[in-house]
Image: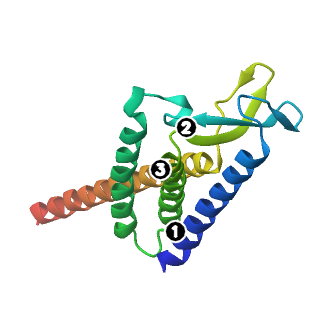
Amino acid sequence: MKAIIAVPVFLVVVIVDFITKAVAVATMVTAGAARPVIGDWVRFALVYNPGAAFGLHLGPYSRWLFMALTVVALFVLWRLYRSATDDEVPKVLAVALVASGAVGNVIDRMRSELGVVDFIDVGVGAHRWPTFNVADMAVSTGAILLAWVLWQEERRAEALQAQQQAEQKASSSTTGAS
């Protein structure tokens, strides 16, 4: 059941990310020539990011280090997916989004030494968010959703534990009173 959600989400994100990056590379000039999409708020500007999110760069081995970290992250995500039950739709969706975004960006790292293709530029005037792509949106959305899901799981577990302790206390006080 959970594969009905995870597989299509994963495939759509990876394919849309791949296509949009290919279009960006084929139609845009490199080095910041921005094309307005929605005024100055949303622009397309081709940027190659040799590092990770928000331009994090760790020297000449960044490419390989981030590919290795992606493999580790995908392993963790696979375990989360496997542990999810069929009724944990938000968790499955979150894992599929993060995994598909990670795969989309690692494909870029493997294909080109220039780095990951970023092309969506959002901001006002000189105040810009770091340029990003579809895979980045999937990772960010999925990570926020996953954090929320895990927080909710923790809250439910704490509430259940408190309820069990209260029942146990009530049970032992009635047993001791007899």
Tell me the amino acid under the disc marked 2: Leu
Visual colour scheme: rainbow
Quarter assignment of residue 175: bottom left
What residue sits 70% from the left and 46% below the top?
Answer: 25
What residue sits 53% from the left and 72% below the top?
Answer: 7
Residue position marked by numbered label 2 in the rendering = 114
Residue position marked by numbered label 1 in the rendering = 89
Residue position marked by numbered label 3 in the rendering = 110
Gap between marks 2 and 3 measured at Cα: 10 Å
Q: Residues within 10 Å of mark 3 (few under 14, many from 20)?
A: some
Looking at the image, residue 53 lies above or below residue 72: above
| Observer-nearest of 148 and 17 | 17
> Furthest residue to the right?
39
**Left or right: 21 in relation to 6:** right
| Observer-nearest of 159 and 3 | 3
Tell me the amino acid under the disc marked 3: Met
Q: Residues within 10 Å of mark 1 (few under 14, many from 20)?
A: some
